[in-house]
Amino acid sequence: MHNLLGFLVGYQISKFLRFPKNVQKTISIEVGMQNSGLGLGLAMTYFSKLSLLPSAVFSLWHNISGLIMVHIWSKKNKFT
C-alpha cells in the first residue's frame, strides 16, 4: 500500500505549507498515483513481458484507490 503513503505524505506536506483544501486534495491524489504509468513504461522498455504484471496490477490498484479517495472527499464537502 505504498500509494496510501503517497496520499498521506502529499496531503500532509501541502497542509503544512498551508495550501487551500482543494489544492491539498489535488496534490495528495497526484503524489499517490504518480508512478503507476512510469513502472509500466520502464517494464515494457527494459524487462521481459512477465515484469509487466506487477506494474499492471498496481496501476489498476492506483486507479481504484484514487477513485475511492475522490469519492470520499466529494461526500465530505462539495465546495473543496
Image (spheres, rainbow, N blue to C red):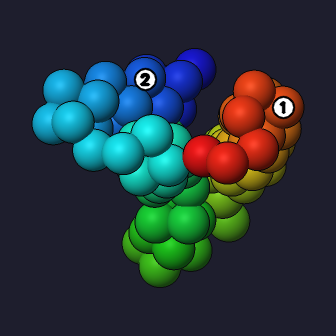
Residue 46: quadrant of the picture? bottom left
| Disc 2 versus disc 1: nearer the observer | 1
Q: Is residue 16 above or below residue 55?
A: above
Which residue is pictured at 76% across the width and 44% down the height? Answer: 78
| 79 on left or right of 16 | right
Secondary structure state at the residue bearing disc 2: helix
Quote the CA–CA distance across marks 2 and 1: 19 Å
Circle 2 crowding by C-alpha within 10 Å: few under 14, some 14–19, many from 20: some
- Residue carrying label 2: 8
Q: Please tell me which residue lies in front, 65 or 1.
A: 65
Residue 18 relative to residue 79: left or right: left
Label 2 or label 1, whichever comes before in sequence order: 2
Q: Is residue 36 visible?
A: yes
Which quarter of the rendering shows the N terminus? top right
- Which residue type does callout 1 highlight? Lys
Q: Residue furthest left?
A: 17
Q: Position of residue 38 (x, y in %)?
A: 46, 66
- Badge number at residue 75: 1
Percent from the top left, x then y, of residue 15? 29, 30
70 versus 5 height, above or below: below
Picture quarter containing residue 10?
Answer: top left
User: Answer yes or no: do the residues labelled 2 and 1 have beta carbons within 8 Å?
Assistant: no
Q: Position of residue 80 (x, y in %)?
A: 60, 46
Q: Residues within 10 Å of mark 1 (few under 14, many from 20)?
A: few
Amino acid of disc 2: Leu
Q: Residue visible at 56% across and 66% down?
A: 37
